[in-house]
Amino acid sequence: MKRTLVAASLLVVVLSACTTMRDPMATDTASGMARVAPPAAAQLVDANGAPIERVPFVSGVSSMTVEKLAAAQACRGGEGAARVTPAGPVEVYRLRCADGRTFMARCEMRQCRQM
């Protein structure tokens, strides 16, 4: 009895692993139609055809200070001030304003000024 239970459990584990490792181009058995993988996101380019690099959001030690500077200039953003340079004594921050403008600030030893 125990061997049957162990064998059934092992069979369930193996079959569940097999269903998660199916070919993404395989046909769907319910509809009989081939499944297609979604297309890769197209890379953005500027007016001259040069690729535009997306910079991930990284907060820094002076993010709050830059957000206060931006608020004084009537610039409020949803995500907040992101550091665009490596961490160090001099950092540059960017904040996307709600009206589409970009607010940039340079912070040296946590003393920030608008660029």
Image (tube, rainbow, N blue to C red):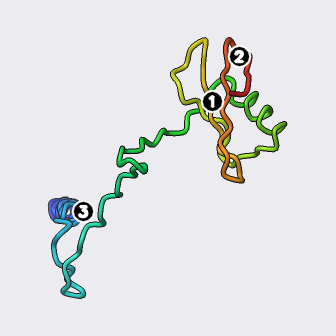
Crowd tier of the residue under label 3, counting other residues whose Cα lies within 10 Å: few below 14, some 14–19, many 20 or above: few
**Residue at left offset 15%, top offset 60%:** 3
Nearest to the observer: residue 68 or residue 26: 68
> Which secondary structure, mark 3?
helix
**Mark 3 highlights which residue?**
20
Q: Label 3 to label 1, Cα distance in Å?
A: 43 Å
> Which secondary structure, mark 2?
loop
Mark 1–mark 2 CB contact (< 8 Å): no
The quadrant the N terminus occupies is: bottom left
Vertical side of 8 occupied by 71: above or below: above
Q: Which residue lies furthest to the front in this view?
A: 48
Q: In the rendered structure, find residue 40 and report the number of the disc placed on it.
A: none
Rendered image quadrant of residue 26 = bottom left
**Mark 1 highlights which residue?**
93
Vertical side of 43 occupied by 89: above or below: above
Q: Label 3 to label 2, Cα distance in Å?
A: 50 Å
**Mark 2 highlights which residue?**
110
Q: Which of marks 3 and 2 is in front?
A: 2
Q: Label 1 to label 2, Cα distance in Å?
A: 12 Å
Instruction: Residue 25: give x, y in percent of width and height.
Output: 17, 70
Q: Which of marks 3 and 1 is in front?
A: 1
